[in-house]
Image: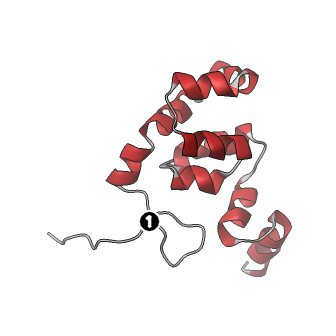
Amino acid sequence: MHDMPSHDYHIDIPGTTIFDGKQAMKGYALNKMCYDFNRAENREAFRADEEAWMEKYGLNEQQKAAIRARDVLGLLDAGGNIYYLAKFAGIFGLGVQDVGGMQTGKTTEEFKDYLLSQA
């Protein structure tokens, strides 16, 4: 059995946050709320009153601020799991390439051009 090295949550890959047990505990409320977005009526209810939903699930100030700012990377830093946060990206009107741009420090168009250059 290998011991896991201790590490900072931001590694040398820009826009990347390691999601481990500590981050999962930090983001439990946020991820629980995102899980409930599997139901369309919950997504609509969130859109209608974001503040009430954030209170209902007990989000902390870091998580609330990231939601208000539409900051997907901030949500990752606040303990969000990327699989659940994909629901937020959709609610925020962001596609996968928008998030990829955020993670790499590029605009969406620059990121799309980069993807095409790698094909």
Q: Position of residue 103 (x, y in %)?
A: 65, 66
Q: Nearer the viewer, residue 87 or 32?
A: 32
Q: Is residue 19 left or right of residue 12?
A: left
Up-down: is 79 above or below 106?
above
Q: Is residue 94 left or right of residue 77?
A: right
Up-down: is 16 above or below 50?
below
Q: Quadrant of residue 64?
A: top right
Q: Residue at x 49, y 29 (%)?
A: 58
Q: Quadrant of residue 109?
A: bottom right
Which residue is identified by label 1? Answer: 9
Q: Residue at x 81, y 67 (%)?
A: 107
Q: Is residue 92 visible?
A: yes
Q: Position of residue 57 (x, y in %)?
A: 50, 27
Q: Residues within 10 Å of mark 1 (few under 14, many from 20)?
A: some
Q: Is residue 19 left or right of residue 104?
A: left
Amino acid type at mark 1:
Tyr
Numbered disc 1: secondary structure? loop
Q: Position of residue 70 (x, y in %)?
A: 72, 46
Q: Quadrant of the N terminus?
A: bottom left
